[in-house]
Amino acid sequence: MLRIDEVSRAYGQTQALSSLNLDVPAEARLGLLGPNGAGKTTLLSILACELAPTSGRVILEGHPVATQAGARQARRAIGFLPQKPGYVPSFTAQETVEYAAWLKGMARRERGPAARAMLDRVGLDAVRGRRMRALSDGMVQRVGLAAALVAQPRVLLLDEPTVGLDPAQRLQFRSLIAGLADVAVVLSTHLVEDVAVVASEVVVIDEGKVRFRGSPEELAKAGAVGAPGDSPIERGYMSVLAGATQRVDA
Ligand SMILES: Nc1ncnc2c1ncn2[C@@H]1O[C@H](COP(=O)(O)OP(=O)(O)OP(=O)(O)O)[C@@H](O)[C@H]1O
């Protein structure tokens, strides 16, 4: 479905990603775990075709995304909820999602009904006329999800979507993601619990490289005796970061 091939990205002297390979199969549920600065946002922005790699290729449904026009086209197949999306505070929830539909090139007559249907799907039908500035953080995040899904993408990329949400909002958002069908999902997070609920496969990245790829159960098994952490998965994650375990078959 979506694949990156030997992708590197530098910002000046900082090497954010180094020769990274990753494939996202159709209907994948991929949790991307990594500490602050690991390269998660850079990786998702490249997968979303919003940021060009310094070297390497992005391949969508078998076709390399080689030009700016190609990237624009690819973005229609990809829904992206960035870590810090910018919204117009005076727009209503409905207008925000319709605007996203316009950016995706949807026809005028389709935008209103599609936005309404998507806001309904994320449980916000009752507040679709409310302005963005009057919504709670959890609601804003769900509007962002509706906007990312409005053009029915085949891949959905979510960059740390539960940061800043309270525990109830986090649970609600996670169960929304877990319930999505017909779309491949890549969710980046540094919260191990997000992965446990949402992902059937986990990729751990650190210092711009893939350190581990496997199921949440395999990550749990990777926990070294005495590793820090509150759960088996967290102990596995900490062990991978400490270099005690390495399993990459990405
Ligand atoms: N625009 C930029 N200019 C310079 N350096 C950058 C830029 N964006 C990211 N970096 C650096 O690249 C590295 C990877 O950053 P990135 O934001 O991709 O990591 P991350 O895993 O998403 O981190 P976080 O969990 O803190 O969001 C870090 O060292 C970061 O400081």
Image (cartoon, rainbow, N blue to C red):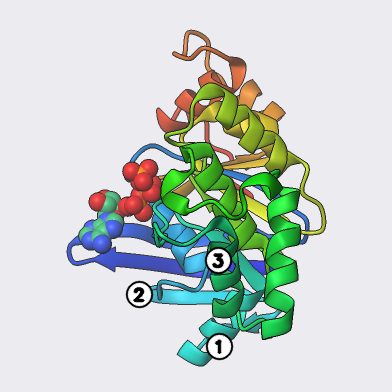
Q: Is residue 191 left or right of residue 179?
A: left
* Residue bearing mark 2: 54
x then y, percent, for residue 118: 71, 58
Query: Would you identify the image quadrant in which residue 156 lies?
Result: bottom right
Residue at the spot 46% in from the left edge and 56% down from the top edge:
82
Task: Tell which residue pokes out farthest to the top in this image.
Answer: 226
What distance separates the C-alpha of mark 1 from that of mark 2?
17 Å
**Which mark's residue is nearer the viewer, 2 or 3?**
3
Mark 1 vs mark 3: which is more N-terminal?
1
Task: Tell which residue pokes out farthest to the left in this image.
Answer: 13
Nearest the camera: 83 or 246? Answer: 83
Q: Is residue 28 left or right of residue 90?
A: right
Which label was assigned to residue 45? none
What distance separates the C-alpha of mark 1 from that of mark 3?
27 Å
Dot 2 beta carbon under 8 Å from ligand 1: no
* Residue bearing mark 3: 95
* Residue bearing mark 1: 70
**Which mark's residue is nearer the viewer, 1 or 3?**
3
Residue at the spot 40% in from the left edge and 72% down from the top edge:
51
Nearest the camera: 139 or 81? Answer: 139
Hey, what amino acid is under mark 3? Answer: Glu
Q: Is residue 15 above or below residue 124?
A: below
- Secondary element at image label 2: loop
Q: Is residue 18 left or right of residue 69?
A: left
Residue at the spot 64% in from the left edge and 56% down from the top edge:
146
What distance separates the C-alpha of mark 2 from that of mark 3?
36 Å
**Which mark's residue is nearer the viewer, 1 or 2?**
1
Hey, what amino acid is under mark 1? Answer: Gly
Q: Is residue 138 above or below residue 8?
A: above
x then y, percent, for residue 108: 67, 84
x then y, percent, for residue 11: 24, 65
- Secondary element at image label 1: helix
